[in-house]
Image (cartoon, rainbow, N blue to C red):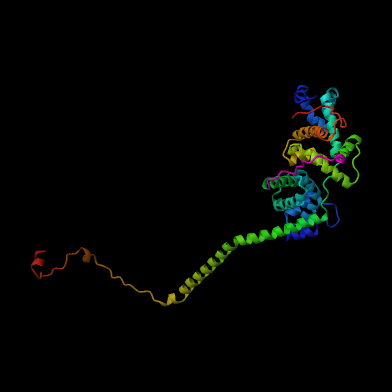
Amino acid sequence: MAASAQVLTLPFQSGEKKADDRELVRLSQNGAQEAFEELVRRHQQRVFALVAGVLHRPDDVEDIAQQVFLKAYLGIKRFDQRAAFSTWLYKIAVNECWDYLRKRKVRPLTYEADLSEEQVSRLEGIVSSSRPPEGPSARAETREVLERMLEVLPEQDRQLLVLKEIEGFSVQELAEILNLNVNTVKVRLFRARGRIMDTYRRRLSPPGKGHAAPGGERKE
Amino acid sequence: MATESDFDRTGCRQHEALLEDYLNEELSGTDARSTIEHWQNCPFCRASLEDARLSMRLLRAAEPSPDPGPGFARTVMTRIRTAENERITLRADFWQPFVSFGWRFAATATLALTVLVSYNAGWGHRTQPKVVTVRPTEATEIFGPEPVSVPVNGDEAFF
């Protein structure tokens, strides 16, 4: 009864000041499904990005993302709001991805094929001219090429780089989501950057054409 | 060529986290001064920082995951409602035997109570209680001498 009364006065529906996550969480805890729907709308893009970054299997991203929100809905009464709702939700997302990978006994997709000359020159163009590819389709293709390159990294380093640089998560967020120390995240990111550039030079650039390694080869 | 031992020897490991901060333009204060001082004098860190910058440029050229659109939230809510209904049904199924037992127990108890009450109020009163008269016993009957009788045969005479 109380919940249905609250539904009628949800601030985000009446065009008043936009309700913050805490208020929406409180309403959801009282059973207002409209409030939870608003939370889904607000966080769906980031959850999608997170799941895509961890899973690296585009076909399953939507299903896992739905599962994440379902689990959040079923557990929202136990959420005490000591942490931000987004952090709590992202942790559910990461756990869901790991569960999925463990249950299905799958590793994220690996690409064994080499890159075509066109793809190589595309990457070289980005590195040398600092001009990003124009248009969503060109950028999507660039992502595909980069994901192939990132396969050489250990799984967690790959996830960190994708989530930080492609999906736009902050170091602080990554530390909270992945239960790591902030400094550990920074060091791993920094080393992963070096390794990916080593791979770029070693595997993609034809001899004499690529960029000289400024610091030489790294050993980890 | 910079190797792992080069990094350890020159103390570059201490600066890795700070170089990452520098790259993200989040470095300030004394940390900033010491780190900039270090990488200006350290070829290994200068090279690493340049690599990190290039990797950043490369990775940021990729398209981030797209927004799933407004249909996604609707699909999620439909799935939530279905799950809720299933949960309610499941909960009802779980308690069903207990509820059924409870009703049967209540019915039996009510029946038994009715029988007892009607017995007490109705034909239970019609049967008269059996009156027992108690005659007081004299003390002499217990402790007095037994009445004398004439023996009938020889055995009785002997006893």
| Left or right: B54 in relation to B107 | right
Does residue B3 appear in the picture of this structure?
Answer: yes
| Left or right: B155 in relation to B63 | left
Q: Is residue A56 or residue B130 the one in the foreground?
A: A56
- Residue at image position (83%, 53%) is B69
Residue B61 at x, y = what percent?
Answer: 87, 41
Q: Which quadrant holds residue A152? A: top right
Residue A186 at x, y = what percent?
Answer: 78, 34
Q: Quadrant of the C terminus of chain A?
A: top right
Q: Is residue A80 or residue B61 the one in the foreground?
A: B61
Residue A12 at x, y = what percent?
Answer: 83, 55
Q: Quadrant of the N terminus of chain A?
A: bottom right
Report the label total: 0
Q: Is residue A79 or residue A135 the one in the foreground?
A: A135
Please report the bounds of the magenta region as a residue range. Answer: A104-119
* Residue A111 part of the magenta-drawn span: yes
Q: Which quadrant holds residue A84? A: top right
Magenta span dominant secondary structure: loop
Q: Is residue B72 or residue A52 the one in the foreground?
A: A52
Residue A154 at x, y = what percent?
Answer: 74, 37
In the image, is residue A20 above or below residue A155? below
* Residue A155 part of the magenta-drawn span: no
- Residue at image position (74%, 40%) is A176
Does residue B27 appear in the picture of this structure?
Answer: no
